[in-house]
Amino acid sequence: MPRRVVLVPCPFQGHINPMLQLGAILHSRGFSITVAHTQYNSPDPSNHPDFSFLPIPDGLSDGQNFASLLNLVLAANVNCESPLRECLAEKQEQHGDIACIIHDITMYFAEAVANHLKVPSINLVTSNVSTTIAHNAFPSLLEKGHIPLQGSTLHDPVPELHPLRFKDLPISRLGDLEAFFQILVNMYKKKFSSPIIWNTMDCLEQSSLTQRQQQLQVPFFPIGPLHKLAPPSSSSLLEEDSSCITWLDKHSPKSVIYVSWGSLACMDAKDLAEVAWGLANSNQPFLWVVRPGSVRGSQWIEQLPETFMDTVGERCHIVKWAPQKEVLGHRAVGGFWSHCGWNSTLESISEGVPMICRPYSGDQRVNTRYISHVWKVGLELESDELERVEIERAVRRLMVDGEGEEMRQRAMELKEKVDICTSEGGSSNRALKELVEYISSF
Ligand code: UDP
């Protein structure tokens, strides 16, 4: 009988995708997969016919009652523990086939459930390693008064966190500092005893992995990018609009800039107008994802300037949600203006697409710093306010100028390194084999 792995994802798109990709990888290696998920932002079981799904009564309803998304995460950790414990205890009694529980590191309640059931647990970290090294430094940064951030020092380097500046520290803006630190404390308070699966790889973060391994004496499995090792699938919470692929088909190679800021970032109507005119004035074709509700005070794009659509015509295509991996792999896409979520970053790097970086929150700032200053496959929009002139210039730098061509070249070289990591004998491939052996040993 195949051994069962129970997955507990954090209920946001950027966390669900890598967890379900990991599930698909483990399923292809012979494990049965159960996804124990909150009812809030429930994944669609019909996209994953090979998995079984276990909705956990979460008391979160539609998530509207929470002061912030971070408060929602705190509540999920409190509300879900006993329902999951009871449900898995019953299953374990009936079938006794649970090999281990793999949980998102932010869903730390699942570790308590695993301890209760006496089954091993494994953490999945969906950000990069450098972000967790910065988290590790937060207590001393707080003690020294560097957090909350001081305007005057934002551009100064953070001692011992090279290449980060204070403005690059991964502080979340999805809630207040108190809720953010509460989650970090809960995540890291246990002296790490369970192994960690990282959605990263040697060719991007070798020195950070070595440094973090010195801090945490537990097995590490850096098996990223998960979406490259997993069979193709989608775990989108919103419907993907594939009209953009037909639109891309009409464009010449590397001519289109893809613009998308992930599943959580928001902007106001003034920003929307600056972005719209910046893109329009760049004279480059662009595919733009505007998520419903992402412009404050609007359902969708009602607040776009009136003359905008007539001005850009066929040069622009706007969708509510795109099949992003397919878009980034399309020959017509030559650049990606991204908020630099870790999934988007990995998806772009894996296709050799250079980026314009405009981080919104948390680890996106760290990713931006690495993209622009370490891997040198993107440029950062630095100014506090979004301004059409700066946007137009950035798009032209990336899509037209020699500077962009050099970044594209480096992005292609990095893509080749990623391909080596995931192919037979590569570091991610080897780490995956070790992970499979590790889980099989339970
Ligand atoms: N995504 C998508 N279609 C879109 C925008 C995003 O499929 O139109 C996916 C994207 O491929 C990525 C995830 O949503 O896998 C977003 O995760 P990321 O870590 O980049 O950012 P977050 O949404 O967590 O801020």
Image (cartoon, grey):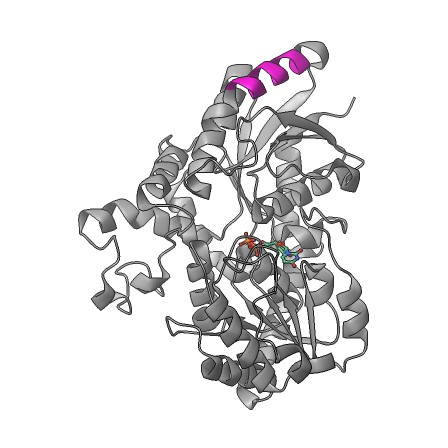
Residue at the image position 71 percent from the left and 54 percent from the top? 424
In which quarter of the view is residue 197 placed? top right
Name, please, the residue furthest toward the left. 144
Image height check: is 380 above or below 171?
Answer: below
- Where residue 17 appears, x then y in whole percent? 64, 47
Q: Nearer the viewer, residue 441 or 342?
A: 342
Is 45 displayed left or right of 154 in the figure?
right
For residue 259, say whether it is visible. Answer: yes
Image quarter hosting the C terminus: top right
Magenta stretch? Answer: 82-92
In the current view of this chain or complex, which residue is farthest to the front? 306
Q: Quadrant of the N terminus?
A: top right
User: In the image, is residue 322 part of the stretch drawn in magenta?
Assistant: no
| Residue 149, quarter of the rendered image | bottom left
Residue drawn at 25 percent across, 53 percent down: 148
Residue 340 screen position, x and y as percent: 52, 62
Predominant secondary structure, magenta span: helix
Decide: is 148 above or below 183.
below
Residue 255 shows in this picture? no
Seen from the viewer's position, the closer of residues 10 and 244 is 244
